[in-house]
Amino acid sequence: MEKFYVTTPIYYVNDTATIGHAYTTIIGDIIARWNRSQGKNTFYLTGLDENSQKTTDAAKKSGISDIKKYTDDMAVKWKKVWKELNISNDDFIRTTEPRHKKIVEKFFKKVYEKGDIYKGIYEGLYCEGCEAFYLEKDLIEGKCPYHKKEPKIIKEENYFFKLTKYSDQVLDHIKKNPNFILPKSRRNEVISFINEGLKDTSISRPNVEWGIQLPIDKKHHFWVWFDALINYISGAEKYWPAELHILAKDILRFHCILWPAMLISAGYELPKTLFVHGFLTINGQKMGKSLGNAIDPLKLSEKYGVDQIRYFLAREIPFGQDGDFSEEALKNRINNELANDLGNLISRTLTLSKKLPEIKGKSEIKFNIKNIEKLMEEYRLTEALNEIWRYVQETNKYINQKEPWKLEGNELEKVLYSCLESIRKVSILLWPFIPQTSEKIFYLLKIEQQKLTEFNKSISKYKPKEPIILFKKIQ
Ligand code: MSP
């Protein structure tokens, strides 16, 4: 069976999830569910990045001296959000787990034995928000472009990884594999960044109290990114290499340059694709806790519904680009698309279907499913969803033209068959995006689906409460 291993970044544990984190995790879930529905042996990994300096700061700030306890409490909160949003991750990796430490040590040993680690002095800038070393030229008006804060000036003894040794190999891999970094614009950005010239990366920090100790020098802890990236292996070693890493542009360089170099050095295969998506913005500003404009995904889903949020994020923000979030746009899509287009299509068809004991026939509405499959395989999710929606709208048009409420007998049966067949296909295709809704529709249609094995499981589990309301309109 073909495998498909997909990951999200592991999120910092120092705060709770925003709708920005939820965006990445929902996209990952859509892709994981799609691949499962295609019969692939799919593994979806998400988790938490716990060894950061931010963790200790946040624990102290909240008055908890036991840092591990702080991370345990936070992990419960993050898991709860993913459960609420119907995220079907197969595992949840935390970088404070022993299984992670073991793999980090094994990985480091390979890099060290390759001769790619040396001791030196790091003198320069460090942004604690990014947990990253910066060069003057990367700052905007002297500030970190993401956290809008001046980085700290540090001078300390560090262990370095010979990143420069792998510049050419990484560049070569990117050039030879057009799908290694998607979308293309991000790939070009990485290529020009490498062409500007890289520097070796510091991979350890002295004088920090939290994290994984360097096996060769216990006075040092791993710089958090070196440890964090390895989660993709420690969380699912059997599934490595990943078919897809999903991330946003803020962490592009770590994933597209450092990570491949680390993997080549340690002798691992490279992931197949890194998809770099845009930022969810509010009035054009990146949304984030440190920027004070974060939206809580749980509150939002309580107010509007989980599938409503999943649908909105996948449809409104062209996957790969930045997109603005507003409740107004969310309400419009819920009312016009989910309640009107889809909800009405189903209620009209099912109400009329009650008039006939049996409905057989041939559909008059043709679907090009191959095209949708191709878009999904190329991670053109928003386009795929637009395409699925075109069928929803076409079927509505068909009903309006045929006016089945005026028909009876064979004529009525012909029209209803076409509509039911459309709804069946649409609900299958929509399952990765709005799983609960699709499962309700399967139940309503009593679908016996063979193509998607996951379906049968969900149908048998699903016990709807009557009456089934697919989407309520929002005032
Ligand atoms: N811990 C590191 C990642 C280590 S992966 C080996 C980290 N964590 S983070 O909590 O800051 O999460 C960053 C990621 O969260 C982004 O790359 C993106 O996937 C997601 N997002 C957080 N806010 C977002 C937006 N406003 N918009 C889109 N994605 C956002 O970086």
Image (spheres, rainbow, N blue to C red):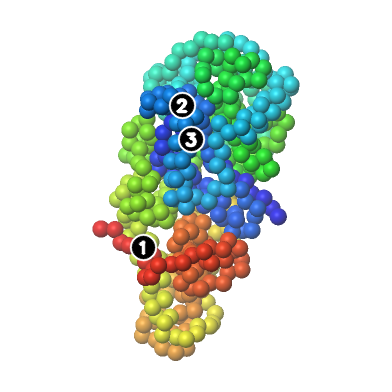
Numbered tag placed on residue 72 in the rendering: 3
Mark 3 or mark 1: name the one nearer the start of the chain.
Answer: 3
Q: Residue 85: x percent and y percent? A: 44, 50
What whole-number distance in Å separates the C-alpha atoms at marks 3 and 1?
Answer: 36 Å
Residue type at mark 1 is Phe
- Residue 400, labelled with which disc? none
Q: For residue 182, say whether it is visible.
A: no
- Check disc 1 and report the residue beneath it: 471
Of 151 and 83, the residue lying toward us = 83
Disc 3 packing (10 Å; few <14; some 14–19; many ≥20)? some
| Residue at 43% over, 18% down | 151
Residue at 57%, 63% (x, y): give it.
Answer: 457
The x and y percentages for residue 7 are 57, 42
Label 1 CA crowd tier, 10 Å (few <14, some 14–19, many 20+): many
Where is 459 relative to 332, above or below?
below
Residue 303 higher or lower than 99, as above or below: below
Instruction: Name the side, left or right, on which 308 lies relative to 425.
Output: left
Q: Amino acid at mark 2?
A: Asp
Q: Residue at x 70, y 55 (%)?
A: 1
Q: Are marks 2 and 3 in contact (CB under 8 Å)?
A: no
| Labels 2 and 3: the sequence-earlier one | 2
* Tag 1 secondary structure: loop
Q: Nearer the viewer, residue 132 or 10?
A: 10
Query: Which residue is tagged 2?
Result: 66
What residue is at 70 percent from the left and 21 percent from the top? 112
- Name the residue furthest bottom: 409
Report which quarter residue 280 is drawn in: top left
Expressed as whole percent of the image width and height from the top left, the position of residue 24 reads 48, 43
- Where residue 19 appears, as percent x and y from the top left, is 40, 43
